[in-house]
Amino acid sequence: MNRATRRHLEKTMGKETADNLAEKIFQFNKLPDHCTACQRSFNKKDKEMVQEWKVVVKQEIVRLFCPQCIKKTQEVINER
Ligand SMILES: [Zn+2]
């Protein structure tokens, strides 16, 4: 991708698109109810959990990671 194309994409899509998408998923309750990696259950009504856990959206697949798995799966998260 050349620089002009990248700039155009950022202008049309916005740099924050991925983050906004994650917020929408929280809002619309499309969140998995467990950690994608270790299956630990997630309580979306627990504000601490909501802040600590991380949603990764890639190609419309929603993944949810608990704090422990965030470190382990850092590579996956960095791919987005
Ligand atoms: Zn986990």
Image (cartoon, rainbow, N blue to C red):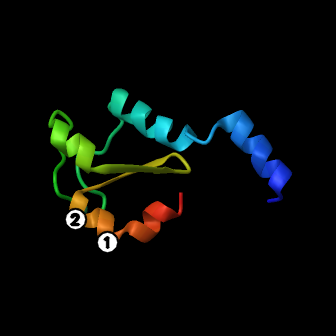
Residue drawn at x 18%, y 36% as measured from the top left: 47
Taking the image in four quarters, ligand 1 sits in the one at: bottom left
Residue type at numbered disc 1: Lys
Residue 52 in the image: above or below residue 72: above
In the image, farthest residue toward the top: 28
Question: Which residue is located at x 35 percent, y 27 percent?
Answer: 27
Position in image of residue 58 (x %, y %):
52, 52
Q: What amino acid does circle 2 point to?
A: Gln
For the residues labelled 1 and 2, the Cα–Cα distance comes to: 7 Å
Task: Examine the image and state in which quarter residue 9 appears.
Answer: top right
Q: Is residue 3 left or right of residue 33?
A: right
On screen, 66 above or below 18? below
Measuring from the top left, give residue 64's x and y in whole percent.
Answer: 33, 52
In the rendered view of the protein, which quadrant contains the N terminus?
Answer: bottom right
**Labelled disc at residue 68:** 2
Residue 43 pos. (x, y %): 16, 41
Picture coordinates of residue 49 (x, y %)?
Answer: 19, 45
Q: Is residue 38 visible?
A: no
Instruction: Judge the density around disc 2: few (<14), some (14-19), many (≥20) Cα neighbours within 10 Å.
Output: few
Q: Secondary structure at mark 2?
A: helix
Numbered mark located on residue 72 in the image: 1
Q: Does any portion of residue 78 appear in the rendered image?
A: yes
Q: Is residue 52 left or right of residue 60?
A: left
Do callouts 1 and 2 mark residues in contact (Cβ within 8 Å)?
yes
Query: Is 53 on the left or on the right of 56, as rendered?
Result: left
The residue positioned 45% from the left and 70% from the top of the image is 75
The answer to which quarter of the image holds residue 77 is bottom left
Task: Label 1, secondary structure: give it.
Answer: helix
Question: Ligand 1: does it lie within 8 Å of the C-beta at label 1?
Answer: yes
In this picture, residue 18 sits left or right of residue 48: right
